[in-house]
Amino acid sequence: MALVAVEFPRLRQMGETVDPDDLVGAAEVAAILRLSHPSSVTTYLRRYPDFPKPVVDLSSSRVRLWRRQDIERWQRERTHT
């Protein structure tokens, strides 16, 4: 499978390159964190100040994407404290 370059304004400002395969939506985040519903991810965003911010947030269309590594790191750090 060929890699496709994905441009997101926030990432361009940050100088990061992200593999599209590393991006996950709320349903995948919920599965990683073993939450019962994808809408719980929004609750986590509000409740935990250290919860990873989405790298893509198109709030007008409710699209939010996170880097899988950020979510997995956050989960590991929370379970080891």
Image (cartoon, helix red, strand yellow):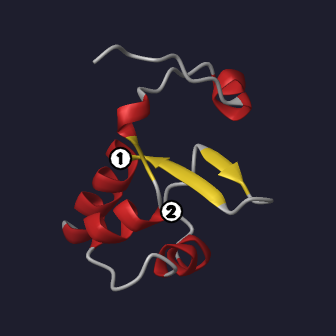
Q: Amino acid at mark 2?
A: Asp
**Which circle's residue, 2 or 1, is located before the other in the chain?**
2
Query: Looking at the image, which residue is at 52% across and 16% down?
Result: 5
Query: Is residue 13 rendered to the left or right of residue 16?
Result: right
> Label 2 neighbourhood size at 10 Å, few (<14), some (14-19), many (20+)?
few
**Residue 76 pos. (x, y %):** 23, 59
State the SS at label 1: helix
Numbered mark located on residue 68 in the image = 1
Q: Quadrant of residue 34?
A: bottom left
The residue wearing badge 2 is: 50
The correct choice, above or below, for 3 with respect to 51 in the image is: above
Which sits in the foreground, 54 or 21?
21
Q: Quadrant of the C terminus?
A: bottom left
The correct choice, above or below, for 27 with respect to 74 in the image is: below
State the SS at label 2: loop
**Residue 44 pos. (x, y %):** 50, 76
Separation of disc 2 and disc 1 at Cα?
15 Å
**Residue 51 pos. (x, y %):** 49, 63
Query: Looking at the image, which residue is at 38% across and 16% down?
Result: 3
Point out the frontmost of discs 2 and 1.
Answer: 1
> Label 1 neighbourhood size at 10 Å, few (<14), some (14-19), many (20+)?
some
Q: Residue furthest front?
A: 1
**Residue 63 pos. (x, y %):** 63, 56
Q: Residue furthest left?
A: 80
Q: Quadrant of the N terminus?
A: top left
